[in-house]
Image (spheres, grey):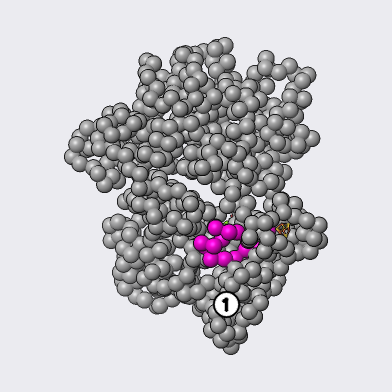
Amino acid sequence: MSTTTDPSSAPHAPAAGDSPLLEVDGLHVEFRTRDGVSHAVNGVSYHVEQGETLAVLGESGSGKSVTAQAIMGIVDSPPGFVTNGAVRFRGKDLLTLPERERQAIRGQSIAMIFQDALSALNPVFPVGWQIAEMFRVHHGSSRSDARKRAIELMDRVHIPAARDRVRDYPHQFSGGMRQRIMIAMAIALDPAVLIADEPTTALDVTVQAQIMKLLRELQQDSGMGLILITHDLGVVADVADRIAVMYAGRIVEQAPVDRIYATPAHPYTRGLLRSVPRVDLKGQDLSAIAGLPPALTNIPPGCEFHPRCPAAEQLCREDRPPLITVNPGRSSACHFSAEVLNGTR
Amino acid sequence: MEHADASPSSSGGPILLEARDLAKHFPLRTGGVFRRHTGSVQAVDGVSFELRQGETLGVVGESGCGKSTLAKLLMRLEEPTRGEARFKGQNIYDLSGKAMRALRRNIQIVFQDPYSSLDPRMTVGDIVGEPFDIHPEVEPRGSRRRRVQELLDVVGLNPEHINRYPHQFSGGQRQRIGIARGLALRPEVIICDEPVSALDVSVQAQVMNLLASLQDEFGLSYIFIAHDLSVVRHISDRVAVMYLGKIVETGTDEQIYERPAHPYTQALLSAVPVPDPAVRGQRQEIILAGDPPSPADPPSGCRFRTRCWKATDTCAEEEPLFVSRPGTDHDTACHYAAVRDDVVVHRD
Ligand SMILES: Nc1ncnc2c1ncn2[C@@H]1O[C@H](COP(=O)(O)OP(=O)(O)OP(=O)(O)O)[C@@H](O)[C@H]1O
Ligand code: SF4
Ligand SMILES: [Mg+2]
């Protein structure tokens, strides 16, 4: 059954009746550890449409990966538990769907690639075999047919001399080539959504440029929705349509990419943008955000950003600001969004 | 020998550290019982530069280009295969005894990884104070604890945390611990090997500001090794670009970033996404084919030629000299060096 989304929780959802391609709604994930309960994800909502690139931006530990793991159903559990929320693919909630249906969607329609391609690939099997396995398992393809399609895919992600390299093992490839292999496996079944978790963070900048170009190309060909998880403000500016900024397990701002860079509506986003070195500020101090993100076992009351926020007031220490629409297509979780947006605070 | 400095804008202090044709080749052996010498990895191969007092020399390049080996050579943690490095005029590889100890005090290093570079079993006080065990003459035993607390204070850590362990600190704080340790012996040169690469951008800014203020306060000279081009530009007076063991271009930050003349530098700059969607699509993106070749088997002639769109037969036959060519105003190692300004765009 397709349920229509509550417009207040998903401010950019398309017209009623027409569910987003993939939607995370009010997701909560916690890790029950010896040191207490770590609130890694605290009510995250975002969505991605066909052909669209959503960048999820945030610093280390902000919950970007755990959110993605919850979408894929691979949260390390225990200690991790999804305690609330929904993950809807074309309107169907994966968290409540019968196991078989859920597995079918996660196996075929949503795929994910990781930062560290080497540890995500199996070291003891040839890469061609690993790609071919996708076709054997999901399509029941014959051995030779699967192998042929593996070579085609390796060509498609521009691995030179694919036919000769199909028998090589992961360690025989460079970091960039391994990332291509992982991308080949991810797109093998033509997924509707690809989640890329820091796909280029471990790579050199010239190789990063190659991989980003490849992802763009594949997306244009297939129209898949892309969720790009990153902490690189440059990469986001280059490829994203929309951004969701995460802080301490929540989305604090969500907006189309051009607008967020020009006029951030949340003090944290503004702080991030300002802490990037820029040519015209050489020789001056960078404007760092003071302090550190909170421990997730002990998130401060009120606004989770208040201990570091230059705009904080008493209200911020007491009341948690909800993520609300500040103007069409944009939302921010700050009591003073409007003033931050127009530059008066 | 002394040659005219083409860049009057860079700080005019005396030359403190000078490398001439520095090279480090690691022997490559095949496995098995008869471990035969089958060649060598030319990790650093003929690097020359000078560092003036109070100046920051940035070194950029991709993984495996030899940046960290260069750092180790300058610390004399490795002996060179050829060439020399002079600290205040003395070749550091000729030093021994007392003079060598003095050198070790004067050149310090801060490492990349704030997680693995600190011994987890040592307290912060032990880590920062360890250099005094090796150089007890610098600080008498009785005043060490106070000195360590001072150092913690200098780098913005709470001096009362002297008995804590590394795991009780965040990445940025651990990097500060590494910096405090680097400062302990009052060095004149600090080699920073990817000091902020492991940090989040907001914390990275804190550490960069700290490095800049320490430089002002203590007149330090830095060799700042990093792969993030905008971070290097922010802190450096001059920049050296490395590729496969060699410096391919050096200049002031403006020369390198506004008027790059070596194709590799141009490709590198063009690959860096600008954090401003308003300029999306404006820069000329040069997508290089393939990966850097192995330093165990570098290409003949110009090492960049296998990925270079300008390469000709000459590039395969002749190694390009590292000189300033007509139409350029700084040194590059390319037969066809030519300034290009369409690979860099600025935020509006
Ligand atoms: N298996 C686990 N057990 C306990 N805590 C976990 C586990 N996996 C993740 N966490 C915690 O969840 C929080 C969010 O982590 P997450 O990996 O989502 O951050 P991230 O935004 O992806 O950060 P990064 O940029 O470093 O990848 C962190 O505090 C992390 O320590
Ligand atoms: S709600 Fe208050 S503390 Fe939070 S970001 Fe806004 S101004 Fe800062
Ligand atoms: Mg992550």
Badge 1 amino acid:
Ala
Determine the residue positioned at 74% across, 60% down.
Answer: A303
Residue B59 appears at what percent x and percent y?
Answer: 45, 34
Residue B144 appears at what percent x and percent y?
Answer: 74, 22
A215 or A73: nearer the eye? A215
Determine the residue positioned at 64% across, 57% down.
Answer: A343
Residue lying farthest to the left in this orientation: B313
Residue A265 appears at what percent x and percent y?
Answer: 63, 61
**A234 in relation to B42, above or below:** below
Q: Ligand 3 falls in which quarter?
A: bottom right
- Residue B234 left/right relative to B258: right
B198 or A159: nearer the eye? B198
Q: Check residue B310 for magenta coloring.
A: no
Q: Quadrant of residue B183?
A: top right
**A326 in relation to A268, above or below:** below
Determine the residue positioned at 28% across, 34% down.
Answer: B327
**B16 in relation to B296, above or below:** above
Residue lying farthest to the top in this orientation: B98
What secondary structure is found at the residue carrying circle 1? loop
For disc 1, the marked residue is: A13
Q: Residues within 10 Å of mark 1 (few under 14, many from 20)?
A: many
Q: Is residue A122 visible?
A: no
B342 or B98: nearer the eye? B342
Determine the residue positioned at 69% across, 52% down.
Answer: A293
Query: Where does the magenta region start and end?
Result: A246-265
Work out which quarter of the rendered image holds the C terminus of chain A and state it: bottom right
